[in-house]
Amino acid sequence: NAVTVGVVGATGAVGKEIVDCLNKSSLDVSKLRIFGSSRSAGSTRDAGKFGEVPVELFDVAAARECDVVFLAVSGDFALEHAKAISEGDDGAVVIDNSSAFRYDKDIPLVVPEINGECTKGAKLIANPNCTTAIGLMALYPLHKLFKLKRVIMSTYQAASGAGQPGMDELQEGTRAVLSGEREVAENKIFAHPLPFNVIPHIDKFQENGYTKEEMKVTWECRKICGLPDDFPVSCTAVRIPTYRAHSETIIVETEEPVDIEAARKAFEEAPGIKLMDDTANEIYPMPLTATGQYDVEVGRIRKSLVFGDNGLEFFVVGDQLLRGAALNAVLVAEEMAKNGSL
Ligand code: 2RA
């Protein structure tokens, strides 16, 4: 049945992609409503097949009139409003992109291809961190086949992880350096200038020496895959001067011996993955090819020199704004429409 959809934060990088994914989605949308702050209320947004949509001033009562509301705003906003929008039988289903509810044990944290069944009957769903969602697309098929024992991840994350302001800072900074206007780019969004640099620091440092971005990978992999609370997942998260696709080197040790051909076949057959693993022809995942794609690219698949028969190493690249955010959220809504929760 047709649903009314609300988007809060439709002018941000993720919000724009949500509207774009809704344009291509199988979800039967009878009406798209866009909510914004007093700054944008009163203007209109080009929403593709939904036409010029007026931006309404956000208001809980108006959001509750929708069947499903996507929040592409801050965690503080979500903490303040998500429960009020979704509570009660007549509240809207809320799919929240922030980290506000991800670690709440009563709120499903969902990658539809992995634990989509948790959405059944839920009113508030958390969308995972982009780095986790992209990595798990490849990790989960391996887990089903060989049972993961430990995971080590190193990431190369694009500017888009910091939203449109991050992408603008990369572009303007690169231009300023190349034009000779500046020797080193300015930085406001990132901890250091990003052009011609790599920054091993995303989000706040924690007491254990990891960053919050790195711990998100650990906490979220465990929750989404139903792994024990002490399951070993370790990540080093690094920002690099690419635009909008995150890359990840993943090393796994497995309980069962790994058959490389079976792993390759599992990647090939898994939904949401494009196998890019033909080194003889220089085919492997890259941000340039993964950008704008729904599927996560997986390649450079090889037996691990460290873990031998029980280990695999590979490279994954996924569009941070799509699989890492907007697409995952829209797929959650599609899943909920299918399982009768919408
Ligand atoms: C980043 N993972 O790349 C964050 C965004 N959610 O900065």
Image (cartoon, grey):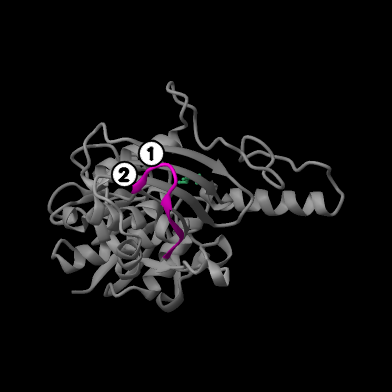
Magenta extent: 296-310
Tell me if label 2 and label 1 are in contact, CB under 8 Å. Answer: no
Q: Which sits in the foreground, 331 or 39?
A: 331
The image quadrant that residue 92 belongs to is: bottom left
Q: Nearer the viewer, mark 2 or mark 1?
A: 2
Q: Is residue 328 above or below residue 78?
A: below
Q: Residue at x 13, y 65 (%)?
A: 340
Element at badge 2?
helix
What x and y, as percent, mark residue 28? 26, 75
Residue matched to label 1: 216
What x and y, as percent, mark residue 295? 41, 67
Instruction: Give the spatial CA distance, label 2 vs label 1.
Output: 8 Å
- Lower position in the chain sequence, tag 2 or tag 1: 1
Q: Could you tell me how many numbered marks the image carries?
A: 2
Mark 2 residue type: Cys
Q: Quadrant of the C terminus?
A: bottom left
What x and y, as percent, mark residue 118? 17, 53
Question: Is-magenta flag for residue 304?
Answer: yes
On the question of residue 272 being in view, the answer is yes
**Which label sits on residue 221?**
2
**Horizontal relation, residue 181 to residue 289: left or right:** right
Q: Residue at x 52, y 38 (%)?
A: 202
Q: Is mark 1 within 8 Å of ligand 1?
A: yes
Element at badge 1?
helix
Mark 1 residue type: Lys
Question: Is-magenta flag for residue 125?
Answer: no
